Image (cartoon, rainbow, N blue to C red):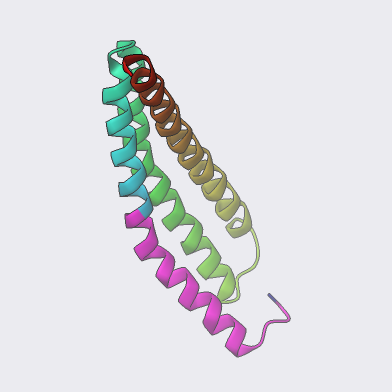
Amino acid sequence: MAYWDERARRYAGFSLGVDYLFMVAYSTTIALACVWAAGVLGGTAGALATVGILLAWGQWLAALCDGGENAALTTMLLGSVREPWPAVAWWCATTKFCLIVAGILYALAAVGVRAARGAEAG
């Protein structure tokens, strides 16, 4: 970032701002997919439904982590590229991506179960 000109910094700042809108969209979408998946998988085992509900709430935590990551990146963009900001950004991003991937995999597993049940019925 030390070599970025003013234009590059403005683009990065704009991108970080737009990301705040995206947080609401992806966290809500994945959370709804997890709730749907909990309904599909809940008939198989109650514990799997509980996992889905927890993952749905976890998507809001992912969005909060994304906000924390963006706050740390914005702080670095404005000139404070020293600890703890790089570590804060890294931990927030890692937590965010783990929760997102877990939610998507859970929903995809339910899609597979639903497809298998449909194939058995057909």
Q: Is residue 11 magenta?
A: yes
Q: Is residue 12 above or below residue 32?
A: below
On the image, which quarter does residue 80 sit in?
A: bottom right
Q: Residue furthest top?
A: 45
Q: Is residue 8 magenta?
A: yes
On the image, which quarter does residue 51 sit in?
A: top left
**Which residue is painted at 37% across and 32% down in the image?**
55
Q: Is residue 30 above or below residue 84?
A: above
Q: Name the spot of residue 87 as percent of width and height, x first.
A: 62, 52
Q: Is residue 25 above or below residue 18?
A: above
- Image quadrant holding the N terminus, namely bottom right
Q: Residue furthest front?
A: 122
Pick the residue in front: 19 or 76.
19
**Which residue is painted at 28% across and 13% down in the image?**
43
Majority secondary structure of the magenta segment?
helix
Q: Name the spot of residue 40 as percent of width and height, x first.
A: 30, 23
Q: Magenta span covers which residues?
A: 2-25
